Amino acid sequence: ETSLRATGVDFLKSQNTREHHTDGYNIKNLVVRRGHPFHVQVSLNRELKADDKLSLRFGIGENPMKIRGSLMSLKPEREPEFHGWKISVVKKGGKECLLSVTSSPNAPVGKYTLNVKTGANIYKPENGVIYLLFNPWCKDDAVFMADEAQRKEYVLNDTGYIYVGSSFNIYDRPWNFGQFEEHVLDACMYLLDKSKLSLAHRRDPSYVARAMSALVNANDDSGVLMGNWSGNYRGGTAPMDWIGSVTILQQYYKTKKPVSFGQCWVFAGVLNTVMRCLGVPSRCVSNFNSAHDTEENLRVDTYVNEAGEKLNSMSLDSIWNFHVWNDVWMKRTDLPNGFDGWQAIDSTPQERSEERFQCGPCPVKAVREGDVYLPYDAKFVYAEVNADQVYWMVRKVNGRNKYIKIGTETRDIGRNISTKAVGQNKREDITKEYKYPEGSKEERKSMERAFSFIRPSEMVPRSNYASTVMENSIATHPVALRETVTKSGLHLEITNTEPLHPGNPLELAITVKTSTPGSWTIDLIGSCQLQYYTGKVQANLGTMKETINLQGKSEMQIPLKIAPDAYMKTLASVDDEVLILVTAIAEVKETNDKRTKETSMRFQYPPITVQMPEIARLNDEFTCAFIFKNKLNVALENCKLLVEGLGLFKMTTFDQGDIMPGRIMKSEIVCTPTRLGDKKIVAKLISNQMKGISTEKAITI
């Protein structure tokens, strides 16, 4: 009798991928999620008999072996279960055999090669590599997420927003995650191999997430993105010039070399793509006024000169206007109960953790409860959202620096923690997931708990130079003292009185308020500077100094006006978006009360409008037009229009030259939809004078 041989394998791709929510992946191979059955149809050279030996063998890694658990040998009749994998015959008919395979819900994630063994014969199908991903739809998977709307957003949505700007004006930057695009899944698999995670660790989303946080930055391991905050981006793409992760991951996969350049939102955008691509629910999280503290002492020192201008060089620590990281959803089997759910991970290279630039996963609940001893990097994340800011004035006395403490701000850091809302194009504030309400009993308890693990340092300035002269007046109180209300009820507010259009004067105002009976003389100094989002000052634009008198409960608005000439040159010479920083320092003569306030604002730009149909048909061309009117008083030089639409239009940059004041730019593209569903065109206009105008438009295919 002829020996049994397999002659073909049908991976039933369209049926399997629909059932596994993997039909989006742009790849020849079968992609399935662990713990859920999929079907394969094996063709044989003759009918299957009762005593025939047939097995499906799934191997992962260089040298798959049964004993290591890297080779699953599944025999429908004799050994239907192996290492948590199951196989069964669905139906036999003639020379065909339909089999159902269910991988273990904690199987190692990665690429498996399928062979069919019949007696001594082994058949290797073409495209016989199957991609196995995490499965948020499976109750027994550590990344299980019960809510369908959340799974749609955090696993399947390939577009979204990253929130940036400042807590004074938050704005959304559209971002194409593109986890289903060509080569993106292969890039993620390459990173998994590069991570050198053991098979056991590949089962566990917390190890995978930690490894990916290390590999998305190029530090230590020639990972995906090279960070650069220098302002000089020659030889690469400026961080502001990306509108999505796809080009970055495709270029990385092609060259296997780090891509230049990233800043925090680019790192977070790419890590979000990688985690969603691997099947782990993930979201981008923006923290406004984020403390980047190098000493784990929960305090950031800010130094100003006598004119009230912030000084760069003094501090090792800093406060970023915003910082973006990611939350990934999983059960933490390695921790005590109560810390499942969202875990913070961060791929922006800031601080080493276990010898590498990696951060997380840190349970968001551990940050809220003050359990900062839990792995990984909880102290670091806790400080980012909870540090206190201490202001010091630096005065020259007999040629030496003298430091005077002029205020402590306990409520400004870790504001407006934001992510995109589920199923809606709007911002959701998730601050309450990271911290209890300011001043609540729970907040006090959580702080006390955190402080038992973090030793807040004494109240001394931490500047590189500060050790030279110490102020006697500095008591050694721990940082936990909350700022008391001043005797005069002194309060400061900073606003703009006109829109902040580049090319116009910056019309700013400082409002000074008192609220208690009495006659108060107040010395006010104010300054205006341009700064990067990392808090680094780029230019001093102007200062003001006034002494005012207020009676009882009253207020006065003091204008601060900056001429265009003071800032336009700087604005045009940097490749980053810069913010307007206003600092105000007030002192009540009668009581020595001091108050310090700073506010960052962004420039405002005219919009881009997009004209295109609301509905189009698969593979039918349609036209999309971008219109921009320069309503500013200045020419916009070297304009570039960046356009990308997933499933509609490949990322392209169009040079638009200079756009004079009052002129209108109109640019048209022709799109050919290659995929069904709701799609989006994302566009961004950048020029020497402005970096941050983006827009998007939705279309149904």
Image (spheres, grey):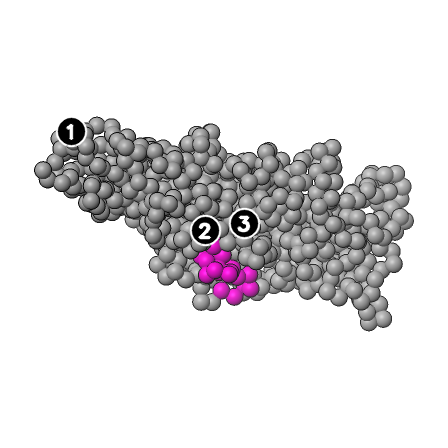
Residue kind at label 2, given as amino acid type: Leu
Disc on the earlier residue, 1 or 2: 1
Q: The disc labelled 1 sits on which kind of residue?
A: Gly
Hey, what amino acid is under mark 3? Answer: Asp
Q: Nearer the viewer, mark 2 or mark 3?
A: 2
**Residue 96: quadrant of the picture:** top left
Q: Earlier in the sequence, mark 2 or mark 3?
A: 2
| 3 versus 191 height, above or below | above
| x and y, in percent, of residue 315 in the image | 69, 60
Q: CA distance from mark 1 to mark 3?
A: 53 Å
Q: Which residues are magenta?
A: 215-233
Asked whether residue 633 appears in the rendered view, the answer is no
Q: Determine crowd level at label 2: few under 14, some 14-19, many 20+ residues with C-alpha closer than 10 A.
A: some
The label shown at residue 346 is 3
Q: CA distance from mark 1 to mark 2?
A: 42 Å
Q: Quadrant of the N terminus?
A: top left
How packed mark 1 is, by other alpha carbons closer than 10 Å (few <14, some 14-19, many 20 or more), is few
Numbered mark located on residue 93 in the image:
1
Q: Residue at x 74, y 40 (%)?
A: 448
The reply to whether discs 2 and 3 touch (Cβ–Cβ < 8 Å) is no
Q: Is residue 250 left or right of residue 455?
A: left
| Residue 656 colored in magenta in the image | no
